[in-house]
Image (cartoon, grey):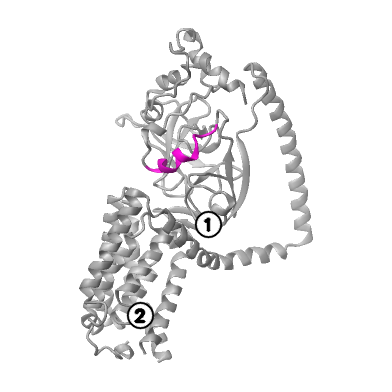
Amino acid sequence: MAAFGTGADRPLGGRGGSPGFRFTLYALLSVIMMYLDQRAHYLEQVRYVLQAAAYPLQLAVNSPPAAWRWLKESLQSRETLQAENTRLRAGARDLELRTMRYEALARENGELRGLREALPPVADRWLPAEIVNIQLNTLRQRLLLNRGAANGVFKGQAVLDDKGLIGQTTHVGPWSAEVILITDPEHAVPVRVERTGLRTIAVGAGDTTSLALPYLPGNADIRSGDLLVTSGLDGVFPEGYPVARVTEVHRDAVQPLAQVRAAPLAHVDSDSEVMLVWFRADHPAAPAPAESAAGGLKSGNPAMQPQPAAPKSHATPQAAPHEPAAPPPHGEPAPLPAQQTAAAEKPGERQSVQAAEAVPPAAAAPPQGQP
Amino acid sequence: MIRDSRTRLLLSALVALILTVLPLPWWLDVARPAFLVLTVIYWSVNAPRAGGLAIGFFAGLMLDVFQGPVLGEHALALSLITYIAVREHQRIRSKPAIQQALIVLAALVMYEVVLFMIDGWTGHPVTSPLRWVHTLSGALIWPAAAAILSYGAGHHA
């Protein structure tokens, strides 16, 4: 270490002022940057450029694992490939059959609901993206994808794999995008229990295998094995995509809330490719436009939260009896009050949420008629 | 001489940055030392004029791009550590390796405290005790890291 004494005899001040002065300068610069980035979001452009500059390094870091994967794939034996081929072909046939069934069901559903034709699926466009870098620890669960603004990716876009929801994009660079996983402790996704329609919020627990459902009352109707799907109330994810399966439910007599854990369906830690999804903006099940979703990651703007009351098949039956009294006097499908999302957070108010959602069924039917 | 040490500084900072963003299994990831912070401390103590405060600031900015919730967070924390290391470089340099490791531990804890406070103020609180693990592992590998960096330096010069 002493080898580095050379040149140390010059006083430290030198050009650019004393270290103390320069430190004050840099500290001030950092604080201003933090302020601009946090409060005013002025630094999106700077971040965009920096992310572009950082991308080659991230690619380089990822290249050894990628090369290893490529080598392994190219050295696979003929038998393995043939076996895989047969399996894939069988899987594709299976899926085709299921699609046919699905189309029939969708048409039937459309007819039952008095629509002229069935609605197209809510997903408009898919883009496969490769995972370039992955950060999976208890504090941060992020992915870096090799698609960015050049491919049309936007901030707050939903990311899925073939099993379920993975997360949403947080920072988008020109050729890369950072994704926050649903298991990140800072992420929360509004979900619905498929069996009962019960709405709640699933919060990341910091490891890839579990989500926490901290806002359910002790007497909530939920049991292990229940499937959680997105409820579409957040303006990012559309309604009805599978998220997780409940693994354990703890009911403690002295605790007002049940302790519920769920395992995400997506295989975040073994995936090498994920899907970026664009949704049809005019579809009833689609999330709100991206502009409102962009700021809503952490602190939602209450004015942006309500969505036009999309007629949802699962919500109507309960409200059907008092339907005649329900339509508001002005006869217009007014956007629902912000209470919709707020109520979803409060346990035990499920009835009121569903009622609120079903209020304008008669009035809301016409806009749905034109796909 | 200064230019020479500057290239070595940038090279080692690049290697440290790669080590920082290298994907690791989560249990290793938690204990991963803050390589870039250690490198910056090393150069601030042993060649305070080669990089000075600028290297601390820009290394922090790189960390912000890779893992910061807001730009400027790591930059501020690392500037502070660099400033202290540059100011006290003669006193730190003369200490034996064990004492240096303790000083580095204190510096890393201070660094993490700054990050912790900024995380809280900006609304990204991460209260898990695991975030402090890297300060310990960083202090543990300090003697080895310093030896490697000084070996590279001696070899070159």
Q: Which mark is residue A23?
A: none
Q: Do the residues labelled 1 and 2 touch (CB within 8 Å)?
A: no
Residue visible at 58% across and 65% down in the picture: A65
Residue B44: percent from the left, percent from the top? 30, 78
Residue A94 screen position, x and y as percent:
73, 38
Q: Which residue appears at 58% of the width and 43% of the height?
A: A277
Residue A336 drawn above or below residue A149: above
**Inter-mark Cα distance, 1 to 2:** 38 Å
> What residue sits right under mark 2 in the picture?
B146
Q: Is residue A14 left or right of residue A277?
A: left
Residues A43 and A357: in front is: A43
Kind of residue at disc 1:
Pro
**Mark 1 Cα shell of 10 Å, populated few (<14), some (14-19), many (≥20):** some
Q: In the image, which is nearer the foreground, mark 1 or mark 2?
A: 1
Chain letter, disc 2 residue: B
Q: Quadrant of the N terminus of chain B?
A: bottom left
SS assignment at label 2: helix
Residue under circle 1? Answer: A174
Measured as percent of width and height from the top left, residue B11 is found at 44, 78
Q: Are marks 1 and 2 on the same chain?
A: no
Residue at image point 45% right, 35% down = A234
Q: What residue type is labelled 2?
A: Ala
For the question of whether residue A12 can be seen, the reply is yes
Is A287 a magenta residue? Answer: yes
The residue depicted at 48 percent of the width and 26 percent of the height is A308
Position of residue A192 measured from the top left corner of the image (x, y, whole percent) = 48, 30
Task: Say if B154 sits above or below B131 in the image.
Answer: below
Compared to residue A25, the image places residue A245 above or below, namely: above
Position of residue A340 in the picture relative to residue A149 (left or right) = left
Q: What stretch is highlighted in magenta?
A: A286-298
